[in-house]
Image: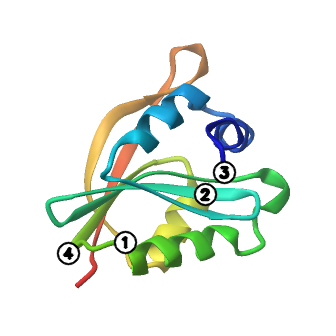
């Protein structure tokens, strides 16, 4: 997928927060620690450094949501990265994503208060989740 395609999917999937631009994706993909995993109408972007993997973002176009693409992407990156553990952050209000991550073995380890900005000056907490991969 091109940075433009990634940005388009991210924009369609993330309506509650600022989507990432094509330039941001291009910059991330230049980093040797960044790994891109794709499926039709979706992707996961992961950084792996010093035995730790961080899911930077995962996005599935709304037309394909609820059909297994998110689970496929999670399985792909979790089985492919060379890391001992993995982390991610998720908005406390994002029940679908929290369910996806929990099904794949992630557990809450911390919370960042008022981390994600929302419209009208509101914000929501970020839940930090972790899993041992090895």
The disc at residue 131 is none
Q: Which of 132/26 is in front?
A: 26
Q: State the image coordinates of residue 52 (x, y, percent, origin top left).
A: 21, 63
Up the image or down, 36 lies above or below 103; here it is above
What separation in Å lies between label 4 and label 3 (alpha carbons)?
27 Å
Q: Nearer the viewer, mark 3 or mark 2?
A: 3
> Could you tell me which secondary element the residue under label 1 belongs to?
loop
The numbered mark, 4 or 2, whose residue comes first in the sequence reads 2
Up the image or down, 83 lies above or below 118; here it is below
Q: State the image coordinates of residue 112 (x, y, percent, origin top left).
A: 29, 40
- From the image, tell me which residue sits under label 4: 84
Instruction: Give neighbour class at mark 1: few <14, some 14-19, many 20+ (Cα, 10 Å).
Output: some
Q: Which of 32/52 is in front?
A: 32
The numbered mark, 1 or 4, whose residue comes first in the sequence reads 4
Quarter of the view holding residue 107? bottom left
- The residue lying furthest to the top in this view is 120
Q: Nearer the viewer, mark 2 or mark 1?
A: 2
Regarding residue 18, the answer to whether it shows in the image is no
- From the image, tell me which residue sits under label 1: 106
What separation in Å lies between label 1 and label 3 (alpha carbons)?
27 Å
Kindly indicate whether the residue at mark 2 contacts the one at mark 3 (C-beta within 8 angstroms): yes
Quarter of the view holding residue 43? bottom right
- From the image, tell me which residue sits under label 3: 1
Query: What residue is rendered at 61% in x and 76% in y?
Result: 72
Instruction: Give neighbour class at mark 2: few <14, some 14-19, many 20+ (Cα, 10 Å).
Output: many
């Amino acid at each position: 997928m091109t940075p433009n395609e990634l940005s388009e999917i991210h924009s369609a999937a993330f309506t509650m927060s600022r989507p990432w631009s094509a330039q941001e994706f291009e910059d991330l993909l230049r980093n040797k620690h960044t790994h891109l995993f794709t499926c039709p109408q979706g992707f996961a972007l992961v950084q792996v450094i010093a035995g730790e993997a961080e899911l930077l973002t995962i996005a599935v176009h709304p037309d394909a949501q609820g059909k297994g693409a998110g689970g496929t992407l999670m399985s792909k990156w979790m089985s492919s990265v060379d890391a001992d553990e993995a982390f991610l952050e998720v908005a406390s209000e994002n029940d679908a994503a929290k369910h996806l991550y929990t099904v794949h073995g992630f557990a809450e380890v911390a919370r960042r208060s008022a981390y994600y900005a929302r419209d009208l000056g509101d914000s929501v907490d970020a839940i930090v989740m972790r899993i041992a991969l090895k």
